[in-house]
Image: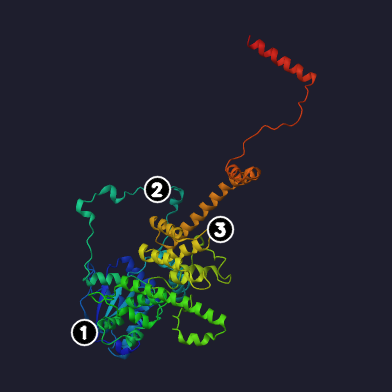
Amino acid sequence: MRVSNVLEFTENHRFVAYRDFALSALDRKVLALLYQPLAGSLAVSFYLLLYHRLGEDEIGYTPPDQQRGLFLGLGLDPGLDGRRRLIEASSRLEAVGLLRVYRRYDPVTEETLYEYELRPPLPPHRFFAHPYLTLLLRDRIGRYAHLELHKALEPDPPADLDRFLSREDVSVPPAEMFRLGKGAGERPEPDAADPFAEAAAAREDGPEVPERIRHADILFRFPRGSANRKWVERLRHMPEAMARINYLAYKYELNAPEICRLLDEDGAFREDGRPDWDLLDRRARELYRQDRKREKERAIRLARLSAAGGDPAEETDRLPPLAETGDPEAGAPAGKESGAEPDGAEFILEVPKRLPAAMPVQAYNDLLRHKPWTRVLRLFFPGAVPDPFLRVFEKIDAAYRLPEPVINVLIHYVLSMDETQRLSEPFIDAIAANMLAKGIATYEEAVAYVRGQEKLRETLERRAGGGTVRGERAGTQGKGAGGARGRSAGRKPDMPVVEDDGPEREMTPEELANLYELARKLKETNP
């Protein structure tokens, strides 16, 4: 639990607890034997105290109550020392994956409420498959005790099963046993005003994105008389929205004043105070296109001044400053993991020849996984990105709604082709439409698609190799008869021709005798 001041977490603050599971006997055994050595007895007691706020046959939220009951239930003094011990116990539970803590804020009453979301303990096979938890447990209890616990909680299968080599799944799918009614195909839409649905949507784990633009920077530059001022102030308590705003700024290379301009637009916020992301993305894309146009004009003007013998520094002072591009390896988009797991060998793409050779393969694949397509596209061009490429990839992003990793793999595919392939907007658009039709939505699927296309192209080239050689030979023979005849001859295959090897050879007497004998036998068999 991140608390910068002990007054932000007191016994007077209210809290709610949430869980959507019930502990079994095995879960309680895992808590006592595996998690308690890691988190401590106070942390496990805190976990069970929150768990029993609801009955064993209930799930959902508990009624709001003061945290004073938690202090008294754990035997802690409701003071400075008790707060620190409870914060430490909560942090230990969060570190082992048993608890998530959220801080809610009511701007009307200026009240802060804590939400404790309980997570079920991992089953033994998943716990021992987790490398960090397994190593931490072995450090706490020792190697031999760890082996005994592993053998007791995850026993080996019976030895008799080794004789049965074949294993067939004979389970019946639900579609064979049950049939849906006529009106059962319509799924009920979730209520937009339902706070439980909102909390469940926000409960999806996402990586924390380093802030490039803080809320204080936006609020400092935002007009006080704007109609959207109240909604911008509420962004302080919406970390998901701020992370997405930072992602837009990183993707389209926007700074704090430009973000303020976007949020000050009419329709930037909906009636419920949430940002209209489609509108913001469209306006940010327009700003990005205008910035690229100004950069191109600026580069041309500086080149002309340098050729005319002028001082480029004076002209640079009169031009507006460029948007900060930042380091292409810095930052990470919202909703993607900033710390990537090791990729499998089958999903590794080689670094193209046109990129710097010093770039590691793993770093290049991480860049394709996590960076916006605008950043990846700029790596393939020494200067400004040509407008045709910007237009076609903007259409793929805005109209086709392909995910960012898929667009990055598409950029890698089309810009890593051999030099003989002509790259045009219809060509790139056709590849994107094919990927969209095949339902490619992840990085792994896109890499598999690229590998399949490369193998198909190599197969076609091998098949056409023999015909090409024959066509070249025939075309060479027909060049002397004129251009038209040479072109037609180049399309025809070589025909087998009987060649004259010289004068006929005379037969020997032995060969004539053999022929006469063969003719006599044939005449006797067929009188």
SS of the residue under disc 2: loop
Using residue 81 as the reference point, say whether residue 187 is left or right of it.
left
What colour scheme does the image use? rainbow
Is tag 2's residue or tag 1's residue first in the polypeptide sequence?
1
Is tag 3's residue or tag 1's residue first in the polypeptide sequence?
1
Measured Cα–Cα span from mark 3 to mark 1: 65 Å
At label 1, the amino acid type is Val
Give the residue furthest to the right: 509
At label 2, the amino acid type is Glu
Q: Any mark on residue 420, and which?
A: 3
Towards the viewer: 334 or 465: 465
Towards the viewer: 7 or 152: 7
Determine crowd level at label 1: few under 14, some 14-19, many 20+ residues with C-alpha closer than 10 A.
few
Is tag 3's residue or tag 2's residue first in the polypeptide sequence?
2
Residue underneath mark 2: 168
- Residue 266 placed where, x, y %? 27, 77
Picture quarter containing residue 482? top right
Towards the viewer: 140 or 465: 465
- Residue 204 placed where, x, y %? 33, 70
At label 3, the amino acid type is Thr
Residue underneath mark 1: 108
- Residue 466 placed where, x, y %? 60, 45
